[in-house]
Image: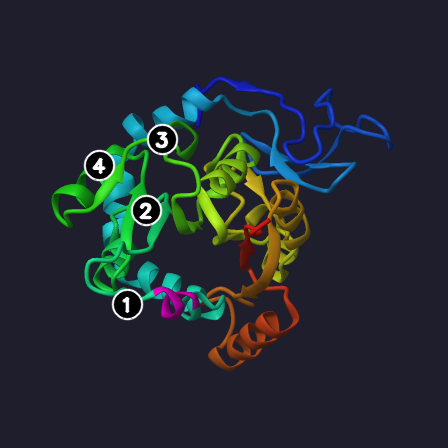
Amino acid sequence: MSGEKKARIPCVLCGMNAGGLHAGARGGFEELLSCGGFSYVRCRNCGLVQMNPQPLPEAVRRRYREGHGDDYLSYELANEAAFLRLQELSLAGAGFYRLEKALLPVPPGAERPRILDAGCATGALLEKLRSRGWDARGLEISGPQAEYARRVRGLTVLESPLEESRLPDHSFQAVLASHLIEHLNDPASFVREAGRILAPGGRFYVSTPNIAGFQARLFRERWRSAIFDHLYLFSVRTLSALLRSAGFTVEKIQTWGGLAAGTAPAPVKRLADGAAKRFGFGDVMLIRALKPRT
């Protein structure tokens, strides 16, 4: 957004220096997308796509907490049912409910398995998980959304980033991050922190837009996920590399979404959606990662 302070940063995945665009074959970045007021660059070393320069962390936090908090709440409430349905479908495809079946229900008096939804918005998914027997906790830095989740749904939601929440080591059996990681200034530290709080054998479910998908390649600067709120645009390869760098084992990868609604006749869209899911070039991806037991 205009007026926010920005800075050049190194590649968050491989640490390559952010000395400038077109910095040479051995390092630096090449400009990928210029979206009017901001640009995405691709690391020449590892291929990660990130906004660079990007808004400073305090500016990003202010945006969600103060500047447009009520707008985000209104948007989430207007789309809540559709978003919940998509989340449930993606988790089902990633095998989440097989994990749930193994952990639930618990005997009377036993401790319920704990799940954390980082970036839980208004808490619709958390509420559903709580009703299924989970000890469901959430994180949401957008004040109006966090307050809605607590006040209306009676959920336990902290209004802080994961890295500042001081959650106990090895205390969760699952961590969810749905369309969150692309908004973060430092996704690497977020992934490491998720690994710290997960119990050995716990699962991390991460969904985000796919820069290597068909829609991103087709629409480029007009791609619906090339927006100012998205500081990183991951591919399956770069997100998998980020997870592995934090000690996770990538267990399952799925993508979906061949063409956006309204961009093609319904029969063509169905064919494109089926092909995207089958061959892995969907617009959105979800990776299930395992924290090893040893």
Marks 4 and 3, Cα distance to the nearest angstrom? 18 Å
Marks 4 and 1, Cα distance to the nearest angstrom? 33 Å
Q: Which residue is mark 4?
A: 144
- At a point 23% along the width and 51% down the height, the residue shown is 77
For label 2, the SS is: loop
Front disc: 1 or 3: 1
For label 1, the SS is: loop
Q: Which residue is mark 2?
A: 120
Bounds of the magenta segment: 99-103
The amino acid type of the residue labelled 4 equals Pro
Q: Which badge, 1 or 3, comes first in the chain's sequence? A: 1
51 with respect to 116 (left or right) = right
Q: Is residue 83 among the parts visible in the rendering?
A: yes
Q: Which badge, 4 or 1, comes first in the chain's sequence? A: 1
Q: Are marks 3 and 2 in contact (CB under 8 Å)?
A: no
The foreground one among 180 and 158 is 158
Q: Which residue is mark 1?
A: 105
Front disc: 4 or 1: 1
Front disc: 4 or 3: 3
Q: Which badge, 3 or 2, comes first in the chain's sequence? A: 2
For label 4, the SS is: helix
